[in-house]
């Protein structure tokens, strides 16, 4: 009984989610005209950026591991 | 009988308050399903279930987080605003106030957070001193000099701008408005699709040559262009009201005038407003008066 996803699985999941959220957030951005989607676009954008940043942190950890292992 | 009615009304209010929207219901369902899938993924050590669980939990939580704002239909705006503007226009027309409405900065008033519109009874009347206005600030119709002192239709909107930006306009300058109002209008409040603010120095120079009055020589003209705002219908209606369009301004033009008056610290007038036939593009010209 343990959690089956590794750190790299989470990293991959974060990457996919970040891409989806960032594209969605850009597509419904008020700068390209008004949309009828009734959601808080600012919060969606912040979530997308946070997810993207989290993915980049996992990448940084990976790079750090590669550098220190050699 | 009235007690029964009151109880029935309060019961109805409670029922409405407890009604869960379908979006919220779906979000909670996704979240719960995701948590169950995560729990099962731990029990059965399944990576597929873990991915599904992680995804459902995340999207459920995200939907709950991004869908929390309350919205009203845009069609409600016009019927709510137009009657008060029509009333104001009618009052000023009947009382024959012919002077140019001027937005007063907070230094003319005791309350440093507000602005008011000063409308002189006669044309070509000079603006009185801040002390003179402060003495009669609580009155709507001033006796000496004869004028009206009214609350701008866009005052509350300009206060909303301040609250959203987290800064009072008294401590900022025009450049701050030029930089921050477009983002506020487009992204934060979604009032308009585009907003341009230009300070026109060349036009000022031209005015210097044309103008006969010395006090007008230093006046700055601020050109504001609003594209596809949510107030298009209100603007169409306001065009019929002579005191509102191009003088006091519709709520959006008035709110910008309040912001300029506060930021510049000088009285401001709306020189003219232009809008396209469908009212999608509104252009307003504001003049900052030097004292």
Image (cartoon, helix red, strand yellow):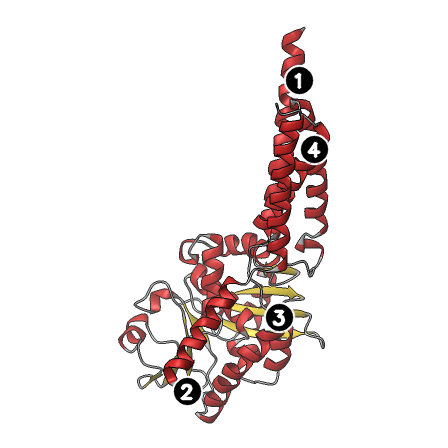
Dot 4 surroundings within 10 Å: few (below 14), some, or many (20 or more)? many
Measured Cα–Cα span from mark 1 to mark 2 = 74 Å
Q: Nearer the viewer, mark 1 or mark 2?
A: 1
Please report contact status of discs 2 and 4: CB closer than 8 Å, yes or no: no
Give the x, y percent position of residue B263.
Answer: 45, 59
Q: Kindly identify which chain the residue marked by label 2 belongs to.
A: B
Residue marked by disc 4: B49
Mark positioned earlier in the residue sequence (4 or 3): 4
User: Do pointers 4 and 1 mark residues of a single chain?
Assistant: no
Q: Which mark is residue B74?
A: 3
Give the x, y percent position of residue B106.
Answer: 37, 65
Mark positioned earlier in the residue sequence (2 or 4): 4
Is disc 2 placed on a helix, strand or loop? loop
- Residue A42 in view, yes or no: no
Dot 2 surroundings within 10 Å: few (below 14), some, or many (20 or more)? many
Dot 1 surroundings within 10 Å: few (below 14), some, or many (20 or more)? few
Q: Which mark is residue A63?
A: 1
Please report contact status of discs 4 and 3: CB closer than 8 Å, yes or no: no
């Amino acid at each position: 009984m343990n959690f089956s996803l590794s750190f790299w699985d989470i990293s991959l999941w974060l990457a996919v989610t970040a891409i989806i959220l960032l594209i969605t957030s850009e597509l419904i951005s008020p700068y390209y005209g008004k949309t009828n989607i009734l959601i808080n676009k600012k919060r969606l954008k912040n979530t997308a950026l946070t997810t993207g940043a989290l993915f980049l942190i996992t990448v940084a950890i990976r790079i750090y591991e590669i550098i220190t292992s050699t | 009988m009235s007690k029964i009615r009151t109880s029935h009304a309060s019961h109805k209010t409670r029922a409405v308050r407890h009604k869960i929207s379908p979006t919220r219901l779906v979000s909670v369902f996704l979240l719960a399903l995701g948590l169950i899938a995560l729990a099962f993924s731990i029990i059965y050590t399944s990576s597929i279930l873990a991915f599904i669980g992680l995804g459902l939990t995340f999207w459920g939580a995200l939907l709950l987080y991004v869908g929390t704002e309350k919205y009203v239909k845009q069609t409600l705006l016009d019927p709510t605003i137009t009657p008060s503007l029509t009333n104001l226009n009618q009052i000023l027309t009947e009382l024959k106030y012919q002077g140019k409405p001027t937005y007063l900065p907070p230094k003319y008033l005791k309350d440093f957070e507000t602005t008011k519109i000063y409308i002189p009874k006669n044309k070509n009347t000079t603006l009185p001193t801040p002390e003179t206005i402060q003495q009669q600030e609580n009155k709507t119709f001033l006796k000496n000099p004869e004028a009206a002192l009214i609350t701008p239709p866009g005052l509350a909107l300009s206060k909303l701008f301040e609250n959203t930006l987290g800064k009072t306009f008294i401590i900022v300058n025009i450049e701050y408005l030029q930089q921050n109002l477009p983002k506020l209008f487009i992204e934060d409040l979604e009032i308009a699709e585009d907003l341009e603010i230009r300070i026109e120095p060349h036009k000022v120079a031209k005015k210097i040559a044309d103008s006969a009055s010395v006090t007008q020589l230093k006046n700055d003209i601020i050109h504001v262009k609003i594209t596809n705002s949510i107030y298009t219908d209100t603007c169409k209606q306001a065009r019929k009201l002579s005191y509102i369009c191009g003088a006091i301004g519709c709520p959006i033009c008035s709110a910008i005038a309040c912001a300029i008056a506060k930021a510049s610290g000088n009285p401001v007038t709306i020189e003219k407003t232009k809008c396209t036939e469908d009212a999608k593009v509104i252009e307003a010209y504001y003049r900052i008066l030097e004292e």
